[in-house]
């Protein structure tokens, strides 16, 4: 149901991350969120620098944003560098500013089960649960770790049934649900490793060709 039929308030899912690089797993989660959570849009919030990830190997922000737009390819998936423009470093601070300033929107935080498994390492992670509803999407090999993790146990009483996901955006936080969406094993880490391997192989072929005069 569109926001025009529900009222003026738009339902926005926020998928944050480094997007280093963006891939079709991000797109599949977003398309699933649009349908299952009855969202108007999904925003890919590209982080300038994830505090938990090394700077080495991180592509420039503008490059990651441009690449993400090529992958998104959907009128209701918006790629944004809003975190850089807000000047925030941590997810909790970014979401707090969005919730306070964008009264025309109801936000849902979207994340994979891998992030639920380690969100307790994030700065002020419990504040995120109290700021807006959260939809967690299943990922291969992470299901049991995610559900046994500190965050899942701490907020177990606030878990909502997957069948009620369409109402999550209007459910007062803390509220979260675990979505058994189609599992996609792809990861940005694997993509970077494959690119590095391909680049190395190309360099070796070029060097070998130069030596043999090919």
Image (tube, helix red, strand yellow):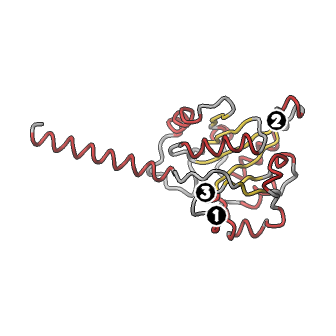
Give the mark nearest the N terminus, 2 or 3: 2
- Residue 115 to residue 63: above or below: below
Secondary structure under the numbered disc 2 in the rendered image:
strand
Pointer 1 with pointer 3, Cβ within 8 A:
yes
Classed neighbour count for the residue bearing mark 3: other residues with Cα under 10 Å, few (<14), some (14–19), many (≥20) = many
Write the residue at 62% across / 40% down: 84
Q: Quadrant of the C terminus?
A: top left
Q: At 79% from the left edge and 40% from the top edge, which residue is drawn?
A: 38
Query: Looking at the rendering, in which quadrant would you find the N terminus?
Result: top right
* Image location of residue 111, percent across then percent down: 67, 52
Tell whether 157 sits left or right of 114. Answer: right
Per the rendering, the mark at residue 10 is 2
Percent from the top left, x then y, of residue 166? 82, 46
Residue placed under numbered mark 1 in the picture: 143
Q: Marks 2 and 1, Cα distance to the nearest angstrom?
A: 30 Å
Q: Which residue is mark 3?
A: 139
């Amino acid at each position: 149901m569109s926001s025009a039929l529900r009222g003026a308030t738009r339902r926005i899912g926020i998928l944050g991350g480094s997007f280093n690089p963006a891939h079709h797993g991000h797109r599949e989660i977003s398309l699933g969120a649009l349908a299952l959570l009855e969202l108007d849009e999904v925003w890919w919030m590209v982080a300038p620098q994830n505090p938990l990830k090394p700077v080495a190997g991180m592509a420039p922000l503008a490059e990651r944003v441009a690449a993400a737009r090529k992958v998104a390819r959907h009128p209701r998936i918006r790629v944004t560098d809003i975190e850089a423009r807000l000047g925030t470093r941590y997810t909790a601070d970014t979401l707090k500013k969005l919730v306070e300033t964008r009264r025309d929107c109801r936000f849902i935080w979207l994340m994979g089960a891998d992030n639920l498994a380690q969100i307790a390492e994030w700065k002020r992670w419990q504040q995120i649960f109290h700021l807006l509803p959260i939809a967690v999407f299943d990922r291969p090999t992470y299901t049991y770790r995610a559900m046994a993790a500190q965050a899942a146990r701490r907020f177990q009483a606030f878990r909502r049934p997957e069948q009620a996901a369409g109402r999550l955006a209007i459910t007062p936080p803390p509220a979260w649900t675990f979505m058994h969406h189609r599992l996609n094993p792809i990861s940005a880490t694997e993509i970077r490793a494959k690119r590095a391997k391909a680049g190395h192989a190309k360099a070796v072929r070029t060097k070998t060709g130069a030596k043999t005069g090919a």
